[in-house]
Image (cartoon, rainbow, N blue to C red):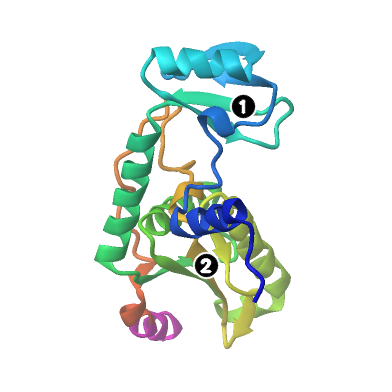
Amino acid sequence: MARSPSGKGSYYRNRNRDPFFNIRRNQRIRASEVRVIGPDGGQLGLMSSAEAYQLAQRAGLDLVEVAAQARPPVCRIMDFGKYVYEQQKKSKESKSTGSKVKEVKFRVRIEQHDFLTKLRHAEEFLDKGNKVKVTLFFRGREMAHQDLGYDTIRRAIKDLEHIGTADNEPRLMGRNIIVMMSPLPVNKRKLIYNVSDKGERLPPPPPDVDVDDEDSSDEDSSEDQS
């Protein structure tokens, strides 16, 4: 059997072992010119990648490519080892708590404020690594307006795409439209509805009577239909 050149084989072994290997940093950054963000989040402007790397070295930090598709690419000066540690710790904590299925229920004619509250709950669950069952229940004659129900569910999926993805297309089951959502990988999740304008995390949203663990959803649904 033919062997791969040692350099190429080493590259694939490192890539498979290290989930952060594809994030270019320091001398692995290929672009000749980059836009640089300082360790405090401030813009340092355009400069050569060599100059940016020297800045990072003088600060005892790393130069990390955070937006490779931008032109020119965007790099940030940061402690990459600390970043990896925090991401791995968050992932480990998420696994240790176990992935649960949470249910968030919508109505056909839901007010905007209530809609945003539901999004806050769903976002919080997905951020903790839980799957979310998004349900819309039709009451009485509301079954004649299934198109409005599907519009609401698709809007919720769209508004949560920064932190989760739908496992399948929404489908009608009895009087419910249901879709299951799974969280994005930890390093791709973002919070929008649970942070303030200053980027600070908000307190948990108030309890919602239409938010349930999966094991209690059948009982709640039967109460709705009675």
Residue 9 location (% of width, % of height): 57, 58
Residue 49 location (% of width, % of height): 61, 20
Residue under label 1, please give it: 74
- For image coordinates 41% across by 12% down, the residue present is 58
In this picture, is 142 found above or below 93?
below
Residue under label 2, please give it: 181
Which region is colored magenta? 218-226
**What is the crowding at mark 2: few (fewer than 14 residues within 10 Å), some, or many (at least 20)?**
many
State the CA–CA distance, disc 2 to disc 1: 31 Å
Residue 57 location (% of width, % of height): 43, 17
Rendered image: mark on residue 224: none
- For image coordinates 65% across by 15% down, the residue present is 48
The quadrant where residue 47 appears: top right
Could you say which is closer to the camera, residue 93 or residue 182? 93
- For image coordinates 37% across by 79% down, the residue present is 217
Left or right position of 128 against 153: left
N-terminal-most mark, 2 or 1: 1
The quadrant where residue 210 appears: bottom left
Amino acid under disc 2 = Met
Left or right position of 45 against 17: right
Question: Magenta stretch: residue 132 in it?
Answer: no
